[in-house]
Amino acid sequence: MASYAMIKELNEKKDKNGNGFLDLVVIGSDKKEYPAKVWRFENNGTFAVDDVIEIEYTIDNYKGKTQLNITKIVMAPSEMAKDFVPSAEYSGQTVFNMLLDKANAFRDTELKKIVTAIMLRHREKLEVYPAAFRLHHAMVGGLMLHTASIVEMAEKVCEVYPNVNRELLIAGAILHDVAKTFEMETSKSGLCSGYTAGGELIGHLVKGAMYIEETAKELGIESEKVTLLEHMILSHHGVPEYGSPVRPMFLEAEILSQLDNLDATIFEINAATDAVEKGEFTDRQWALDQRKLYNHGLNSTEHKVNLG
């Protein structure tokens, strides 16, 4: 078979006989990722991550998973790159503006000032960054889509439970992943290519809390709400095993943590089941406790966010 693809990951390795080969992850024209091999390859200097390539290949089954065995690989026109980069259903700029409008409408002037100042300071990256390297919303504009989904769910929760402090919850939701722009590096495709040194050493939870503290000091805000926001960022992964140094200790922090996990889980389940036919099971999903998932065919993967 012949097709075009984009290189997402590329490593030169040697087999047990000392022969060089390329170990790749490629994005196909369906914008799905596939592991691939180019056997007996002597030099990878011709190819790099984000290159668009024309390939001839056969399909292998390696340890129960589909793998492309590439028999021919040549460069393709670079302008084809846009055809292979997964992007959010909504423009990151549009979603950013919607979230900024929500923050500007806060009655709590301290929360308004902190949230809008941080958003505007990091606007350029926030509008285009993915939300992750491999997992949920790993696409151009994915960070804003993930954030908007949580904000919308948070507003629905506030309708059911009016005792929730809506503006505190929405503020935490908008800021919870803002420091992923510090944590991750992106390639020329706009997708995450790895983690920065600061991302590995500090991470987006701690850095996000630092953003809040630094911004509050610049604005002369010293109220307890600063501490509450910091706690929401630090605790939104829920447990130490997932990176939170502290577990949620008040209602809005707990809701944020649960909604963050829910949105990520829904995305992962949709992505996994969308890759198999109706009536089939997926491979075990390591991000979902090694569960196999069943595609019953009774729902779609449509994702809607209210931009009004």
Image (tube, grey):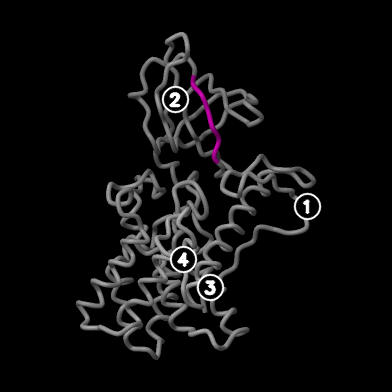
Q: Amino acid at mark 4?
A: Arg
Residue hosting label 3: 255
- How crowded pointer 4 is (Cα within 10 Å; few <14, some 14-19, many 20+) is rated as some
Highlighted magenta segment, given as a residue range: 33-38
* Label 2, label 1: how far apart the Cα atoms are: 40 Å
**In contact (CB < 8 Å): disc 4 and disc 2:** no
Q: Which mark is on residue 110? A: none
Residue hosting label 4: 247
Up-down relation of residue 203 to residue 46 (above or below): below
Q: Earlier in the sequence, mark 3 or mark 2?
A: 2
Q: Earlier in the sequence, mark 3 or mark 4?
A: 4
Closer to the camera in the image, 227 or 110: 227
- How crowded pointer 1 is (Cα within 10 Å; few <14, some 14-19, many 20+) is rated as few
Q: Earlier in the sequence, mark 1 or mark 3?
A: 3
Task: Between label 3 and label 2, give the one nearer the viewer.
Answer: 3
Q: Secondary structure at mark 2?
A: strand
Q: List the single residue furthest toward the bottom.
A: 107
* Label 4, label 2: how far apart the Cα atoms are: 51 Å
Q: Earlier in the sequence, mark 4 or mark 1?
A: 4
Q: Amino acid at mark 2?
A: Val
Residue hosting label 1: 296
Image location (x, y in percent) of residue 230: 35, 71
In the rendered structure, the answer to whether residue 101 lies left or right of residue 295 reads left
